[in-house]
Amino acid sequence: MDNPDAQDARGRVSGRARTSVLLKVGTPRENRRRSSATEQGFSRSDEGVRWPHRSEEGGERKAPGPSGAKAASAERELREGNMTEGAQTTRDMSTGLSKVEDRAKRDPNTKFNSLAHLLDVDALRRAFGRIRKDAAVGVDGVSKDAYAENLEGNLEGLHERLRTKKYRHQPIRRVHIPKAPGKTRPIGISSIEDKIVQGALSEVLGAIYEQDFSEGSYGFRPKRGAHDALRALNRMVIHEGMGWILEADIQAFFDSVVRAKLREMLQIRVADGSLLRLVGKCLRVGIIDGEEFNKPEKGTTQGSILSPLLGNVYLHYALDQWFEQEVVPKLRGRARLIRYADDFVIGFTDKQDAEQVLCWLRERLAEYGLTLHPEKTRLVPFRRPMYGQPRNPSRATFDFLGFTMFWRLSHKGRWALGMKTRKARIQRTLKALGELCRSQRHRPLKEQHAALDRRLRGHYGYFGVNGNTRSLSLVWHRLTHTWFFWLRRRSQRGRQLTWERFRKYLVRFPLPKPRIVVQIWAGP
């Protein structure tokens, strides 16, 4: 959603005698007071946001480099409608936010003192526009459409509560969505106003940290996605000769983030205590799970708009930066890290390097309260087979982002990286489609077809990559028979439905055929 650039909020936001000069130059007593407020970080939950005037340079101050300070994930939450739609672009940003982005890009050691003033009404309006239209409601039961009935008045009121330190984050409603056979994934759903505040915070912090994040990080970032990570993986194993793959997954990552360390990481680049306290309010919020209420002492709520960015910040310092600056120089061969949120793979040219890094990795993550998943973390020999070598069904494979990676023979007889949908993901998809057919079997055929059409096109949109036609065809074939099965159970009369008659239905209401949507091999 494109929005016009926000106007200068100097008079509208502050209207106070405070100036940005006070943030840069002050008495020793004032400087000590500001330093104390910054060190508190997330510790004071009852305070709101201070609203100083905006300076021309954003109140930046040089900070020590990340190496001198204490260092420290999709598409999954979209199902609950809790994530925002669309990526933040430069055209969407206000003038002040663009200045912050440019300064962060020019100087990676800049520390920002004045950021809270960027959370003006225009920023809140942009955050509201990015919320999905079908976003699930929070504990207050207010939908996006209901909030939009008096949008300007609601945004003005929210901004006033932020400015006067009266904003309080409402408890988060937790739901559980199917993840694997017998397992569920807890997703937190915030109220509409809290989503707006989180979205505005994510916009401000993202303008800074998008300039810092590593090239190998792809999760929840603008103009990057899972398919870009798959393209990078293809280049790594085909063109860079990485013959050993460390497949890794962090167990319960979002629930294991140590907030004290996250605060230290944010303070490397952000010195605005008001903004940090607002982030703290979003982290320390209570959770309602059924009839239970609790306030966890660690972690970030999975499903929150702000959590993916905070998770990327955490793993940037705990993993990405450590790997690039400390690990790679010690290795004998080459290595490369590709990460999407808390799922990542590391490619190596040397086996001993891979085994050593696995030991170091466990120790490193333990320092930040994180643990590698014992079942999803393993070292896989994945060297490219020699030309003319026959197929071997027992050859090693590994999983990444819902796909199983394997070596396949191309039409020209050359070995290439193959990607097929994981068996567990196919089973989960078929189970969800079967439940959809069962629950809607009494509705008109036109409505049933529209729902199945949307689901299939969404499935093809992600899993429709080069070489995955067989998996897509399997889903289409099984869905066709599942739909026929449940149509025959609409009523006693429905049992008279024959396959020949059902095929006539398919002519009138055809299910979309499998097709390749995403080009992985032809990617840049």
Image: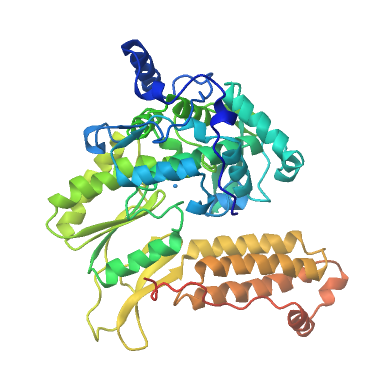
Number of residue marks: 0
Of 475 and 89, which appears nearest the observer? 89
**Residue displayed at 39% across by 65% down:** 230
Q: Is residue 4 left or right of residue 89?
A: right
Question: Residue 478, image x and y in percent?
Answer: 62, 73
Residue at the extreme bottom: 412
Q: Is residue 97 left or right of residue 443?
A: left
- Residue 298 in which image quadrant: top left
- The correct choice, above or below, for 178 with respect to 516 in the image is above
Question: Residue 138, image x and y in percent?
Answer: 66, 37
**Residue displayed at 24% across by 86% down:** 388
- Residue 207 in which image quadrant: top left
Of 83 and 182, which appears nearest the observer? 83
Question: In the rendered image, is residue 95 in sight?
Answer: yes
Quarter of the C terminus within the rendering: bottom left
- The correct choice, above or below, for 123 with respect to 518 in the image is above
